[in-house]
Image (tube, rainbow, N blue to C red):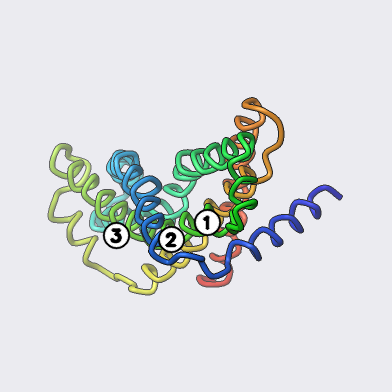
Amino acid sequence: MKIFTHIGQYLLLMGKVFSRPERLRIFLKQVFKEIEIIGMNSLGIVAIVSVFMGAVLTLQVGINFVHPLIPNYLIGLTVRDTMILEFASTIICLILAGKAGSNIASEIGTMRITDQIDALEIMGVNSATHLILPKVIAALLFFPILTLISIILGVAGGIGVSLLTDVVTFYDYVDGLRLFFHPYYILYTMVKMLIYAFIITTVSSYHGYFTNGGALEVGKSSTKAVVYSIIAILVMDLVITQLMLT
């Protein structure tokens, strides 16, 4: 079946990717470049989405927690745990799959159809390690930072709602943020983010690396990279949650 062909090609490509870089200085320079491209350039969209997710979540929870027996501090607690457990990792990575993933696939795909990858191979350079490994390392280093930023900004968005509306008071919201905090949740979301970072970079690189044809095929490879990255993220979300939280 075709799916097994793709899995085999993917695993063979990963075997080529994770080999020792030929020139460490050039490799490190490329890693820092990818941190800027993949990570720093995604800060804006992550910040905007996180603030509004926290704000909307606070409004929705506050509107639904109207029973007199439900304390208002549960609004802050719910927003905090939801941001940590799901939104700051899974939802943010679904966005990054579209932004960073498509960029990776189109970049490598363009290099493939313009024979730049073949030129690297002719010069004796391991093209997989040279092109893909810096992206993987950069994502593994910076995506967890994006997660922490997302959590903080999501909570801040909820604070903004508590100050600007009467859904919940600021003091009740902050009390909820302080109660029943489980440090294990941070570990859980960091594990998820590292796995998602690996999925986004490697799956996108795979589709770009095996692009055939012209410019139209580069666009198709970018679309496939985003779609398959999202599917893989959702499947792994289910698996990791089952393994770590149940």
131 lies above or below 224: below
103 lies above or below 131: above
Q: Mark 1 or mark 3: name the one nearer the start of the chain.
A: 3
Q: Three-letter amino acid code at disc 3?
A: Leu
Callout 3: few (<14), some (14-19), or many (20+) C-alpha neighbours within 10 Å? many
Rendered residue at 32%/59% (across/down): 145
Q: How far, Cα to Cα, is label 1 from label 3?
A: 45 Å
Rendered residue at 33%/73% (across/down): 183
13 lies above or below 48: below
Callout 1: few (<14), some (14-19), or many (20+) C-alpha neighbours within 10 Å? many
Look at mark 2 in the image and give the residue it sits on.
27
Element class at badge 2: helix
Q: How far, Cα to Cα, is label 3 from label 2?
A: 43 Å
Q: Three-letter amino acid code at disc 1?
A: His
Residue 245 x, y percent position in the rendering: 50, 70
Are the two marked residues, 2 and 1, in contact with CB atoms closer than 8 angstroms? yes
99 lies above or below 195: above
Look at mark 3 in the image and give the residue it sits on.
77
Closer-to-camera residue (62/208) = 208
Q: How far, Cα to Cα, is label 2 from label 1?
A: 7 Å
Viewport quadrant of the C terminus? bottom right
Look at mark 1 in the image and give the residue it sits on.
130
Element class at badge 1: helix
Of badges 1 and 3, the one in the foreground is 1
Residue 164 x, y percent position in the rendering: 14, 37
Are the two marked residues, 1 and 3, in contact with CB atoms closer than 8 angstroms? no
Q: Three-letter amino acid code at disc 2?
A: Phe
Q: Mark 3 or mark 2: name the one nearer the start of the chain.
A: 2
